[in-house]
Image (tube, grey):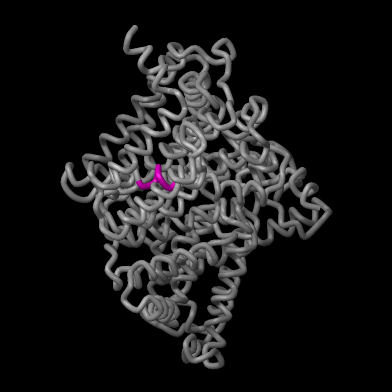
Amino acid sequence: MNQEISQKKVIIPEERVNIYDEDDIQGLTIGNKKVRKAIIFIIGFLAAGIPIYETLVSPLMPDYQRPIHLFLMVGLTLLLYPSGFFKNNKTESFFNIILFLMLGFVCAWASSRWTFFYVTPSPEPIEAVFGLIFMLLVFEATRRAIGPAMAIIGSCFIIYCFVGPWMPRFFAHPGYKPTELVTHLIVGVEGMMGELAAISATQIVFFMMFASFLKMTKSTNIFMNLSQALAGHRAGGPAKVCVVSTAFVSMFTGSASGNVATTGVVTIPLMIKLGFKKHVAAAIEATASTAGQFSPPIMGAAAFVIAEYTMNSYWTICKAALVPSICYFAIMFIVVGILSKRDNLKGLPKDQLPPVKSSVLNALPISMPMAILITLLAFQMSIQITIIITLTTLVIICIPIKSQRIGIVKIFKAISNTAKILIPITTSCSVAGLIVGVMTLTGFGERLSYGIVTFANGNLFLGLVMTAVVCLIIGLGLPTLGAYVVLAALGAPALVQLGAEMLAAHMFIFYFAILTAITPPVCLSAYVAASIARTNPFRVAFTSMGLAPFIYVLPFLFVYDVGLLMQGSALEIFYSILKAFLILTIVTILFQRHLFTKMAILEFIILIAGLFFYIWSKNFPVLVIIFSVFFITQFIRDNKYKAFIKGVKQ
């Protein structure tokens, strides 16, 4: 049975509809093909084009902006993605057209009654019906785009609003009528058309536009070639290509499963060909790709929400994520090196790799827009203007390069495709807004935070462990952004009360929400990697956890040492990085029981004793001395000193 599961192609949300194929319109299949393509193009272009208009010309008021944005995005989802309810294409299409028209009506209703809802807390019963229709339409679009989990959880929270009086005392509340929910859960600050929808409509859309233009100019292929040229010839070359290429590509995609699908189709077969076991090759790709959502600048679009929740700038969030993401990829590189040394795996012949010189030269033009992006963000320029300038630079730079040149038609297509890329994020934001609205309305979030604080009894470490477990459980099956939004309302206040800094608490929760991608039983990234490698997905997931246990240690480090989040003086930050890197390296070596050669029992005991001594005493110099002795011992036992002395003499 497990073998059959592993052989079956896993369809991730990014692959259910090929957003770069104009003909792939599965929710609307009747009528003239050109007309259908034009409808999808226009809706997508408007969804991504209106934010550009707002930035350059005149911003829209919330009562127009948010209903229009959700109408276009949810409507696009209903027309692109099939419901799966009907086998007959005509029935499917008519059903989706009816839903689209209903959506237009309820969004127009919400826009026209926006001010009234704020003035009159209890609308008419018929308006509660309109609100329910809107909720159901958004749930249906969410189910189609990202799977049923988010919609089911959202529905459970709606039911919770009504059954509060009959719940156990800890979760009980007075209960609410349908008419009382409309204002708070539809147009409220924390509702489906609330602040999260606004972030999607005004900020996230621009970074998705950046990703769309990079895809249209074939820039991701250039970074893939550069990775192969730089790392492919080294020991375990394909695995190192996997880590390096994922580090490059993840900066733009911000999706764990998307990274696996993009880079894994190249790196996993190469790793298997050079001797890596199938489940190990898939685990390396899944683990490396998981960091994509933690890598600036896009960070799975969650950076904007974290900035909103912590009242920091977007640039501050990117800086905070920089060091942990670098540590992640650096330690993954060490893991791959240890595996290659242990199993005596060689690199690829240089004649099978792209030339280094030409690969670097090809990547230089694309590096300029990235440099402009980072510079403008560092100077606190608005995200919208920053992306518009960056995209203009990208288009101009690609004009002399025939293979990457894009004309006005492709520019319009890239803008339209932006909306398709944005679909999973917008639907997640809308449902997450509803969930957070329910938690604040009923006090559920405060109760759970109180439970964490009570359980921890003032101990921050226990609070972190409990929050991590809650994150891994609640995050199962949810998209990362949705999981973070829900969990931030539950766990962050508790961690702050226990002594964690606010930014560190939110980054901790975000990090563990990401790790559900490789943590069983859902582990979507592991499923995608396993389908490419033709192996068992659960074996891939457990191998990922064994290969890289450091990923579960890293978030604890940056909570206790905020220097890893780029807070403090340059010297303090450097010292924090040094400590974290050594600790994560030691954890990795202990789990692999190998560095240059297999660890002796005495080496293992001394190294683990040194680690525990540091945890107890915080005496870092002693840990450095112990690791240095261990390193030299391994160096000598592997006879590397002979080659070293020979090299010095020459």
Where residue 611 appears, x then y in whole percent?
Answer: 36, 52
Camera sees residue 188: yes
Furthest residue in direction top, as rendered: 650
Image quadrant where one finds the C terminus: top left
* Magenta-drawn stretch, dominant element (helix, strand or loop): helix
Relative horizontal placement of residue 52, taking residue 186 as reference (left or right): left
Where residue 461 appears, x then y in whole percent?
Answer: 36, 67
**Is 113 situated above or below 412?**
below
User: What is the number of callouts on the image?
Assistant: 0
Q: Nearer the viewer, residue 138 or 266?
A: 266
Residue visible at 57% across and 10% down in the picture: 351
Where residue 391 appears, x then y in whole percent?
Answer: 39, 32
Q: Nearer the viewer, residue 555 or 378?
A: 555
Which stretch did the figure color magenta?
583-587
Image quarter of residue 24: top right
Furthest residue in direction right, as rendered: 88
Residue visible at 49% across and 40% down in the picture: 599
Relative horizontal placement of residue 496, taking residue 178 as reference (left or right): left
Q: Is residue 585 magenta?
A: yes
Camera sees residue 100: no
**Is 591 situated above or below 427?**
above
Q: Is residue 523 magenta?
A: no
Where residue 483 appears, x then y in whole percent?
Answer: 49, 61
Q: Nearer the viewer, residue 69 or 478?
A: 478
Residue visible at 36% across and 47% down in the picture: 583
Residue visible at 49% across and 30% down in the picture: 245
Relative horizontal placement of residue 455, taking residue 275 as reference (left or right): left
Relative horizontal placement of residue 183, taking residue 561 as reference (left or right): right
